[in-house]
């Protein structure tokens, strides 16, 4: 893993490229072996036992801060602060600090246990994570803590509560308040116990449902004669029984190949239905999960689960979500229908859902035969060249460059090569630190701590051992105070460079897009250094957080950015033919409208399942799925996906895993795609045209427009109303207040203008 730092000066691009593409030129292994080192720059973490010790000292300090909060801001305190605004800000700062010192270790431990190659460190990370997570769970039901927050918030006047200067603090406060209330802290004992039981059952059922979405579907079959239509090579890879049938796993490559290439629609239909089947048990798990969520929502005073999920989102409520989706549907449907007509020209018949991949494959094969680039595209996208391109892009538009950490200071470089399945971790968020007055924590030890009672497990209060992790702080240009520096860990599963053949890690185009996308999250965390860690960087509403990353995908596809880095790994002067490459991408993605229409339908299904429809008796999720699909589908109504056919029944909704992780929020990615498209067309697409006429110096690489994104969106994290951020960057005053009109405006922007 290479540590990438933020610097405001130019960097040696060649050095960045060689560090990733030719690591043998920058040996670190011999330096690391046999030496104690600091994990993620924390000098206190030299050995695994240190992480456990730090988690215990953090726990003790958290208990001190807890005592300070309850005795300084609760309604029972003897001294009242005359200034409710100052009192509220001090309270929020203390809550944020309590959260930060816990997350500082929990997030670090999460990263270590997923990334570290040493089992001793993994064990220590698991122990630290478990200890502090269990303690954090006790805080969610701490009545005195809740009372202190609610009391401080209640003392603000309505005018002060809506004041834009208090938006960040109020956002942090409401986050904590909602967490408390979702644990039933405001309910009577009997109701609270029921809510806890519901929460536990939701977690258990949800996990079982999600696990079931990844189970292999029931096998289907193909006859030998049918298989022969794809050639002897395909036949030889299968085993046939005495009836000349071979079993096919619907999830493996054979099934996907049959969908794309088999000329017989009955075979495709059989495969398609087999992929979209679910067991009765899986259907029951989904329906139980949806009903549990509805019961939970009603118990907490909400109408349905969508109200629970959307109360802190940019879009606001379910009516607004549907207004957006229906607006996007009206913009997308004509595009999708035109694409469907192109496919129908190849078939002469009405297309069914199981025909899409076959005719799309045929369509692209015919059109790429002449234009497909004969060279291996991945040869132009080494990891080093992509990181170099990102550095040069950020330097042009944000004034930020990458610097690879020198190997004479090991810091995080505990191994010369690390791979993992995750994309990135935010190990530490930004937060203002100069107002903490942490020395005052000890003033509340005598009145707030019981030295004879353990905090968690065997950990007792101990003032001498209550130091949290020490965080480096810095001054920020133009802002008063000191801020702790954020740390983002960026990890990938790319194949390592080959030291024998000297070939670097080469990326498929989808990997390049993912790299740019995830770097959008990382740069958001680095630039979004706010006063409170709970609203820094990517800690913003779910339906706003993907915007910077999707913008990065637009940059990755632009000719100007590709020209910065896309060159052959054997010869940096051998540039990618960008024009032919973009033509190639357009051909491969020509059914983007059809795919988007499908996503709109799924987002609508997500909303439907999390409405009060689940309270109807009986509730049949398969029939409800069929209704939503029929409304949003572009295929003939006779192919209603809920109907039975000779291939089976479409019950794919019970394989829709995002219903678990993104319940009532699946619209978010579409929402941010539309906003990103609008920003791109407003700021950069027009710049390209002006640039070609010689009217603009930089075009897509405009520093002016980059600063506009940085100052309007990135620097705020979640500390500002996202609608105000959007108003600033688009310069459309009608967006500032949000609400239904703003949402309808976004829906009408669409993705195709």
Image (cartoon, rainbow, N blue to C red):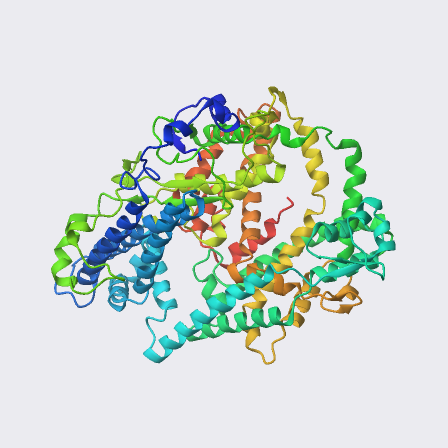
Residue 368 at x, y percent in the picture: 77, 36
> What residue sits 11% from the left and 60% below the top?
446
The residue closer to the viewer here, 571 or 523, is: 571
Query: Which quadrant would the N terminus be assigned to in this image?
Result: top left
Q: Quadrant of the C terminus?
A: top right
In this rendering, the count of numbered labels is 0
Vertical placement of residue 343 versus 649, above or below: above
Q: From this view, report whether residue 563 is shown above or below residue 648.
A: above
**Does residue 3 appear in the picture of this structure?**
yes
The answer to whether residue 730 shows anywhere in this view is no
Residue 476 is left or right of residue 463, and the answer is right
Q: Can you give x and y, in whole percent of width and height, for residue 382 in the image?
A: 57, 30
Q: Quadrant of residue 455?
A: bottom left
Q: Is residue 295 left or right of residue 609?
A: left
Q: Nearer the viewer, residue 88 or 295?
A: 295
Residue 257 percent across, percent down from the top left = 75, 49
Q: Position of residue 685 (x, y in %)?
A: 59, 35
Could you tell whether 304 is left or right of 228 in the image? left
Q: State the residue at coordinates (43%, 29%).
A: 402
């Amino acid at each position: 893993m290479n540590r990438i730092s933020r610097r405001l000066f130019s960097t040696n691009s060649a050095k960045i490229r060689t560090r990733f593409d030719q690591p043998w030129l920058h040996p670190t292994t011999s330096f690391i072996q046999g030496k104690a080192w600091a994990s993620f720059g924390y000098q206190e973490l030299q050995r695994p036992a240190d992480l456990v010790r730090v988690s215990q000292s953090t726990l003790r300090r958290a208990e001190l801060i807890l005592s300070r909060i309850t005795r300084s801001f609760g309604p029972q305190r003897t001294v009242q602060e005359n200034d409710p605004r100052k009192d509220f800000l001090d309270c929020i700062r203390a809550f944020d600090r309590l959260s930060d010192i816990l997350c500082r270790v929990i997030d670090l431990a999460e990263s270590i246990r997923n990334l570290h190659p040493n089992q001793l460190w993994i064990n220590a990370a698991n122990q630290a994570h478990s200890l502090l997570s269990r303690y954090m769970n006790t805080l969610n039901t701490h009545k005195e803590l809740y009372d202190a927050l609610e009391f401080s918030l209640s003392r603000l006047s309505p005018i002060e509560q809506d004041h834009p200067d208090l938006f960040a603090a109020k956002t942090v406060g409401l986050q904590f308040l909602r967490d408390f209330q979702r644990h039933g802290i405001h309910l009577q004992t009997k109701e609270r116990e029921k809510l806890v039981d519901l929460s536990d059952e939701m977690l258990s059922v949800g996990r079982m449902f999600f696990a079931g979405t990844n189970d292999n579907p029931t096998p289907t079959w193909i006859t030998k004669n049918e298989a022969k239509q794809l050639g002897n090579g395909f036949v030889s890879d299968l085993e046939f029984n005495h009836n000349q049938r071979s079993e096919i796993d619907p999830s493996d490559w054979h099934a996907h190949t049959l969908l794309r290439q088999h000329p017989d629609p009955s075979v495709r239909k059989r495969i398609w239905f087999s992929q979209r089947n679910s067991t009765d048990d899986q259907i029951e798990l989904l329906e139980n999960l949806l009903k549990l969520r509805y019961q939970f929502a009603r118990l907490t005073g909400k109408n349905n689960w969508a109200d629970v999920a959307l109360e802190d989102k940019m879009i606001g409520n379910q009516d607004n979500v549907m207004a957006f989706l229906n607006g996007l549907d009206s913009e997308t449907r004509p595009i999708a229908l035109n694409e469907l007509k192109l496919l129908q020209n190849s078939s002469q018949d009405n297309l069914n859902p199981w025909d899409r991949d076959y005719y799309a494959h045929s369509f692209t094969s015919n059109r790429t035969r002449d234009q497909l680039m004969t060279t291996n595209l991945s040869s132009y996208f080494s990891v080093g060249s992509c990181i170099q391109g990102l550095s040069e892009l950020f330097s042009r538009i944000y004034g930020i460059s990458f610097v690879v950490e020198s190997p004479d200071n090991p810091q995080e470089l505990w191994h010369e090569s690390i791979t993992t399945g995750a994309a990135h971790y935010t190990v530490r968020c930004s937060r203002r630190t100069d107002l903490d007055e942490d020395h005052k924590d000890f003033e509340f030890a005598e009145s707030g701590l019981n030295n004879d009672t353990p905090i968690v497990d065997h950990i007792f209060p101990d003032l001498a051992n209550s130091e949290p992790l020490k965080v480096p702080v810095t001054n920020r240009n133009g802002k008063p105070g000191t801020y702790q520096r954020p740390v983002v860990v960026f990890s990938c599963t790319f194949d390592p460079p080959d030291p024998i053949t000297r070939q670097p890690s080469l990326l498929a185009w989808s990997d390049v897009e993912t790299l740019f996308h995830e770097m959008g999250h990382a740069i958001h965390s680095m630039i979004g250094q706010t006063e409170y860690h709970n609203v820094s960087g990517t800690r913003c509403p779910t339906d706003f957080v993907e915007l910077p990353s999707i913008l990065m995908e637009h940059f990755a596809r632009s000719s100007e950015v590709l020209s910065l880095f896309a060159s052959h790994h054997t010869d940096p002067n051998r540039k990618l033919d960008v024009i032919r490459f973009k033509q190639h991408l357009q051909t491969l993605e020509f059914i983007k409208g059809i795919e988007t229409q499908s996503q709109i339908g799924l987002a609508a299904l997500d909303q439907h399942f999390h409405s009060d429809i689940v309270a109807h008796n009986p509730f049949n999720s398969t029939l409800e799925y069929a209704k939503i699909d029929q409304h949003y589908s572009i295929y003939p109504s006779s192919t209603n996906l809920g109907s039975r056919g000779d291939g089976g029944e479409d019950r794919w909704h019970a394989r829709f895993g995002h219903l678990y992780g993104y319940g009532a929020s699946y619209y978010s990615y579409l929402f941010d795609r539309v906003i990103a498209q609008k920003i791109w067309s407003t700021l950069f697409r027009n710049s390209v045209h002006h640039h070609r006429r010689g009217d603009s110096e930089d075009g897509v690489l405009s520093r002016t427009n980059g600063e506009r994104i940085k100052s309007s969106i990135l620097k705020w994290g979640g500390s500002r109303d996202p609608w105000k951020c959007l108003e600033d960057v688009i310069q459309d005053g009608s967006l500032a207040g949000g609400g239904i009109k703003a949402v309808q405006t976004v829906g009408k922007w669409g993705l195709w203008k």
